[in-house]
Image (cartoon, rainbow, N blue to C red):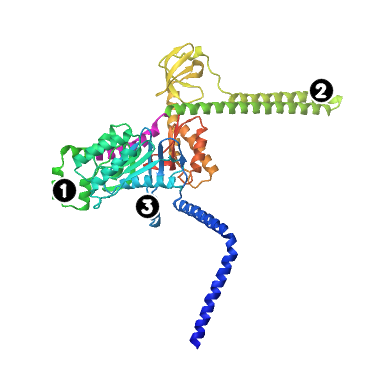
């Protein structure tokens, strides 16, 4: 009986649940359309929130979109590689490349495990993310465009069912690429030409690359074939790229450099892995001499390029020194003359006020005496007047000493070719080459200029020796207090602006034609403010970012006229 009662109670519970749900459904039925709409809205908001969370996680931005056929990718990161490295506290090396209507196809070569496939996958994945409405981890100045077709040949898709080998599968894909490719197509091909006899595979790959180039499609291709590297170097529309390699430690640097092909370093990698020496020696003997020499040439070019970049930085600090010094001296001279005129005017004014004050005192003193002592007071007043006049004369003499020394006339200078001279009120020494129409052509070393004879001062041997000592002392003092790199990281914007202005003044005084401003990357606001300030200076001739391997957009290189 208890069991039957329990069963009945459970049945009643089910009927009650059914009744409640039925009633609830009936109550909500009039709003069914709204609930379906709310579900769609919630899904949309959830999707937008997910995109925002991914963008925050990747520090992603929206790059500039262009209607033209262009890909200007600056400091791009592979999203998954970036997240994994960040989790493991490792740095991710960004890559930069530029493709446009003139340089459409990038052929990337270099050692195995050097990052060639990562370059291909990074650009492809970021393009697909962007065209799917996602923000991407690149520098905000990057420029992308929208493609109608994106083709990828990556990995092995051999098919037993369709009787396709690896190479057959790749050729099938290439046939499809050639059928559909146009100037709004972006393609990616990994290990181009592999899967068959290298000689035939290389020839077919070169022919396919030539046809894709004619279709004006944009693409990134990875390869080890030397014939493709040579073809890219002499074919318009195709450029070589290489993954940098540390030839000292035989380790990849994962940095993409544009403009030259990369060596495979197969022998070096095999030696580092530990293959027996006799096996490596046998492999070298079997290599054709030209192929081995070509690979060695590429290795040498990469090393030489690094050395040239280092030397170029040092050489660039020594250009345009003399012209900057002359401009600096002229500015100092003008400023000195202005200050002297102001001082002279002020001293004359004070002297006049003092004389007038003493005259008023004399007149007041004369009024205080009666007629009986007028004669004595007049004599005393005259004495005061004479003393005041003497003081005023002394003061005026002191003022006149502040004036610039009178320049001798042209006839008195006895200027002639070969005479050592200097421009008045400067320490710049030159030699007269010729004289014509009261003007002289003066050689100041690496600068030759025309100066009016009235502006020149001949120098005796004693004066010449003194000026050379002064110039040497001034130069040494400036050099001890000058650094060619200004670090403004961590400064407020106003502090950074003041520091940059002081650096420009020091550079002009030193005659340095170029210096660096280290501001870091960050959000790019400080870099933008600094470059806007630099463009306002007429002395600044050029502003550019450092090379990627030397800091990229985190450093601004400033060139002065």
Look at mark 1 in the image and give the residue it sits on: 280
One can see residue 229 in this view: no
Compute the Cα span from label 2 to label 3: 108 Å
Asked if the residue under mark 2 is in contact with the one under mark 1, i.e. CB atoms within 8 Å, the reply is no
Packing grade of label 3 (10 A; few <14, some 14-19, many >=20) is some
Q: Nearer the viewer, mark 3 or mark 1?
A: 3
Could you tell me residue 100's position as x and y percent? 38, 35
One can see residue 392 in this view: yes
* Sooner in the amino-acid sequence: mark 2 or mark 3: 3
- Tag count: 3
Could you tell me residue 541's position as x and y percent? 46, 30
The picture quadrant where one finds residue 28 is: bottom right
Look at mark 2 in the image and give the residue it sits on: 375
Tag shown at residue 163 = none
Classified by dominant secondary structure, the portion drawn in magenta counts as helix
Depth order, front residue of 459/200: 200
Residue sitting at the far right:
371
What range is drawn magenta here?
297-320
The quadrant of the image that shows the C terminus is top left
Is 162 on the left or on the right of 146, as rendered? left
Seen at 41% across and 36% down, the residue is: 69
Please say whether residue 311 is one of the residues in the magenta stretch.
yes
Numbered disc 2: secondary structure: helix
* Sooner in the amino-acid sequence: mark 3 or mark 1: 3
Compute the Cα span from label 3 to label 1: 34 Å
Please say whether residue 344 is one of the residues in the magenta stretch.
no
Look at mark 3 in the image and give the residue it sits on: 81
Residue sitting at the far bottom:
1
* Sooner in the amino-acid sequence: mark 1 or mark 2: 1
């Amino acid at each position: 009986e208890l069991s039957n009662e329990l069963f009945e109670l459970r049945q009643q519970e089910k009927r009650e649940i059914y009744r409640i749900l039925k009633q609830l459904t009936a109550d909500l039925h009039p709003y069914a359309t709204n609930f379906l709409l709310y579900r769609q809205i919630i899904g949309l908001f959830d999707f937008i929130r997910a995109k925002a969370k991914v963008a925050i996680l990747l520090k992603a931005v929206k790059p500039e979109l262009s209607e033209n056929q262009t890909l200007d990718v600056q400091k791009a990161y592979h999203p998954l590689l970036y997240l994994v490295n960040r989790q493991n506290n490792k740095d991710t090396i960004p890559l930069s490349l530029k493709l446009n209507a003139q340089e459409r196809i990038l052929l990337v070569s270099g050692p195995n495990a050097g990052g060639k496939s990562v370059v291909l996958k990074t650009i492809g994945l970021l393009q697909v993310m962007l065209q799917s409405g996602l923000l991407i981890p690149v520098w905000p100045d990057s420029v992308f465009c929208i493609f109608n077709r994106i083709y990828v040949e990556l990995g092995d898709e051999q098919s037993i069912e369709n009787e396709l080998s690896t190479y057959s599968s790749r050729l099938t894909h290439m046939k499809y690429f050639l059928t559909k490719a146009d100037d709004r197509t972006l393609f990616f091909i990994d290990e181009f030409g592999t899967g068959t006899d290298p000689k035939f595979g290389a020839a077919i790959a070169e022919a396919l690359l030539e046809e894709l180039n004619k279709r004006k499609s944009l693409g990134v291709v990875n390869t080890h074939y030397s014939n493709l590297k040579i073809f890219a170097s002499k074919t318009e529309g195709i450029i070589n790229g290489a993954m940098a390699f540390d030839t000292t430690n035989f380790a990849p640097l994962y940095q993409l450099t544009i403009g030259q092909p990369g060596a495979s370093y197969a022998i070096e990698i095999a030696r580092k892995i530990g293959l027996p020496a006799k096996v490596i020696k046998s492999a070298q003997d079997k290599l054709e001499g030209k192929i081995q020499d070509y690979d060695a040439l590429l290795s040498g070019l990469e090393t030489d390029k690094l050395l040239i970049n280092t030397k170029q930085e040092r050489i660039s600090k020594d250009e345009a020194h003399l012209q900057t010094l002359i401009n600096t001296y002229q500015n100092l001279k003008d400023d000195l003359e202005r200050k002297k005129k102001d001082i002279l005017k002020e001293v004359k004014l004070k002297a006049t006020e003092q004389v007038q004050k003493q005259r008023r005192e004399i007149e007041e003193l004369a009024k205080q005496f009666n007629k009986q002592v007028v004669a004595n007071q007049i004599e005393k007043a005259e004495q005061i007047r004479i003393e005041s006049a003497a003081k005023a004369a002394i003061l005026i003499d002191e003022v006149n000493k502040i004036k610039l020394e009178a320049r001798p006339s042209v006839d008195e200078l006895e200027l002639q070719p070969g005479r050592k001279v200097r421009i008045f009120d400067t320490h710049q020494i030159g030699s007269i080459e010729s004289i014509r129409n009261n003007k002289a052509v003066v050689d100041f070393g690496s600068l030759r200029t025309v100066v009016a004879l009235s502006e020149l001062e001949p120098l005796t041997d004693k004066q010449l020796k003194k000026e050379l000592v002064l110039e040497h002392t001034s130069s040494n003092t400036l050099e001890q207090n000058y650094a060619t790199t200004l670090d403004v990281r961590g400064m407020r914007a106003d502090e950074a602006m003041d520091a940059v202005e002081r650096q420009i003044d020091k550079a002009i005084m030193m005659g340095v034609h170029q210096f660096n401003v280290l501001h870091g990357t960050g959000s790019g606001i400080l870099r933008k403010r600094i470059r806007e300030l630099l463009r306002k200076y007429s002395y600044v001739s050029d502003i550019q970012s450092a090379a990627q391997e030397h800091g990229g957009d985190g450093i601004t290189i400033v060139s002065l006229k």
